[in-house]
């Protein structure tokens, strides 16, 4: 019997299929420093410990922290919240995890905050969230997360996992995606301008861009034909270029 309990309040679903853990570990591409988010009972951790890497983990659940420290005595376990801790390494590092689905989007924004330090990210998400992040322009699932992530990272949609790989089985399918920093990132006026523009554009995604973002641009700028499009038709590069024309 495991020496820990499931906590639904933390969105916990424990991965029990070791082949999935092996595939996630194989997708990491030889990182030097690795942070595992939410290791829980260590299903993925035990595979990561086989890698020649400086591995650290961050876990919020005190019961799991005690279990991990007892089971893996040499493992660095940071007791805390990934949304609140400082970066765990001085240099660039990779993030990996079977992310709690109730905070997975917030974890993506955390990765964006740390984008200058993140060498890669391999994460498991609810399938629909993974699809949204990986979606390209023109897709119905393309949205705020897609644009913001793809401004800074390339996104690889790696594979899907059924509910039977977990205990308890979630009611949704899962998918693993990978972020790698873009070799050439589009120039933006500022992150604040980009976030404001993208949020305004997709909050009224059915409208022509001109109507959705009217308050952010000088009237004469809004005559540009690009504003005849809807938000989902613009690439991250289009949004980046528009930040320089905002009021």
Image (cartoon, helix red, strand yellow):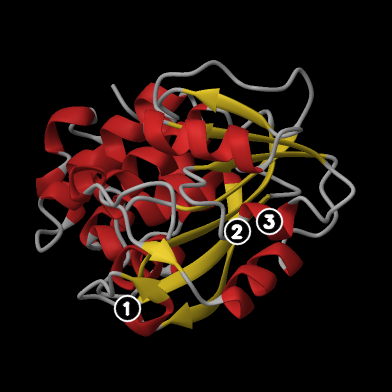
Query: Where residue 10 sits in the image (x, y, percent)?
Result: 26, 43
Point 28% across, 75% down: residue = 169
Question: What label does residue 37 carry, if any?
Answer: none
Q: Residue at x 33, y 61 (%)?
A: 13
Distance, label 3 to label 1, CA atoms, is 24 Å
Assign a secondary structure to mark 3. Answer: helix
Asked if the residue at tag 3 contacts the one at tag 2, i.e. Cβ–Cβ closer than 8 Å, the answer is: yes
Image quadrant assignment for residue 213: top left
Compare residues 110 and 236 and report the one nearer the observer.
Answer: 110
Residue at 32% from the left image edge and 63% from the top image edge:
129
Instruction: Locate residue 50 relative to residue 132 in the image: left or right.
Output: right
Q: Which quarter of the image is occupied by the N terminus?
A: bottom left
Quickly name the residue at label 3: 46
Residue marked by disc 1: 173
Q: Earlier in the sequence, mark 2 or mark 1?
A: 2
User: According to the image, label 2 marks what residue?
Assistant: 44
Q: Nearer the viewer, mark 3 or mark 1?
A: 3
Label 3 neighbourhood size at 10 Å, few (<14), some (14-19), many (20+)?
some
**Tally of marks:** 3
Does 128 appear above or below 221? below
183 left or right of 6 in image:
right
The image shows residue 228 at horizontal and vertical percentages of 22, 60
**Residue in front for this viewpoint, 133 or 52:** 52
Q: Quadrant of the C terminus?
A: top left
| Cα–Cα span, label 2 and label 3 | 6 Å
Outermost residue, right side:
52
């Amino acid at each position: 019997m495991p020496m820990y309990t499931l906590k639904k309040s933390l969105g916990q679903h424990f991965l029990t299929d070791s082949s999935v853990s092996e595939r996630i570990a194989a997708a990491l591409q030889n990182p030097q420093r690795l942070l595992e988010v939410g290791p829980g009972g260590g299903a993925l951790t035990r595979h990561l410990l086989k890698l020649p890497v400086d591995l650290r983990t961050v876990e919020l659940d005190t019961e799991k922290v005690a279990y991990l420290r007892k089971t893996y005595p040499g493992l660095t376990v940071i007791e805390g919240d990934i949304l609140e801790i400082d970066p765990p390494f001085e240099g660039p590092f990779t993030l990996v995890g079977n992310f709690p689905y109730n905070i997975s989007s917030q974890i993506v924004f955390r990765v964006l905050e740390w984008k200058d330090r993140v060498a890669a990210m391999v994460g498991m998400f609810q399938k629909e969230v993974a699809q949204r992040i990986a979606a390209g322009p023109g897709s119905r699932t393309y949205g705020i997360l897609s644009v913001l992530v793809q401004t800074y990272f390339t996104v690889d949609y790696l594979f899907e996992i059924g509910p039977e790989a977990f205990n308890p089985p979630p009611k949704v399918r899962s998918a693993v995606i990978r972020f790698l920093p873009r070799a050439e990132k589009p120039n933006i006026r500022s992150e604040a301008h980009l976030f404001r523009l993208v949020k305004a554009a997709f909050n009224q995604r059915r409208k022509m861009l001109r109507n959705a973002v009217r308050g952010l641009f000088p009237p004469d700028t809004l005559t540009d034909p690009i504003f005849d499009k809807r938000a989902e038709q613009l690439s991250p590069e289009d949004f980046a270029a528009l930040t320089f024309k905002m009021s």
